[in-house]
Amino acid sequence: MERRQFKRFSVQGNVEGNIILKADIEIIDISLNGMLFLITKRLNTNSRCRVNLNIGDAKVGLDGSVIRSNLRESRQIQSDFQPVYEVAVNFVRLSDKKNQTFRK
């Protein structure tokens, strides 16, 4: 007896999707062109990402393209070990307003 509320269907053909990933990052360095940060989730090279920064009282959302993502180390978090990746991102479509926020 099937207990699911909705029937599942096998996927036919090419079906793709995106997941918006929320994770804390540790910023190593940042410029008007991009940033380097550490994260415990793997990001694929050439993938797009959105980085939300708190700069003083301003909150800035930046779109980026991952140019490099390498395993850097493993860290013990509570009783588990997690991989830590070093990720380099180039910002894309940085508006004049966001550019001014960085210059302050």
Image (cartoon, helix red, strand yellow):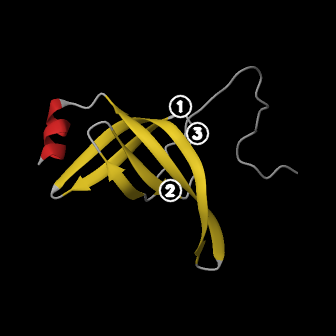
Q: Secondary structure at mark 2?
A: strand
* Residue 20 appears in the figure: yes
Residue hosting label 3: 44
In the rendered image, the vertical position of residue 103 relative to residue 23, given as above or below: above
Type of amino acid under label 3: Asn
Q: Where is residue 72 shown, x and y percent of the image? A: 58, 57
Looking at the picture, tell me which residue is in the foreground, 94 or 70: 70
Residue hosting label 1: 46
Residue at screen point 19% across, 45% down: 102
Mark 1 crowdedness (10 Å alpha carbons): few <14, some 14-19, many ≥20: few
How many numbered tags mark residues here? 3
Q: Secondary structure at mark 1?
A: loop
Disc 3/disc 1 C-alpha distance (Å): 6 Å
Type of amino acid under label 1: Asn
For marks 2 and 3, the one nearer the N-term is: 2
Residue at screen point 30% across, 27% down: 93
31 sits to left or right of 98 = right
Disc 2/disc 3 C-alpha distance (Å): 12 Å
Marks 3 & 1, CB-CB < 8 Å contact: yes
Looking at the picture, tell me which residue is in the foreground, 27 or 24: 27
Direction bottom: furthest residue = 79
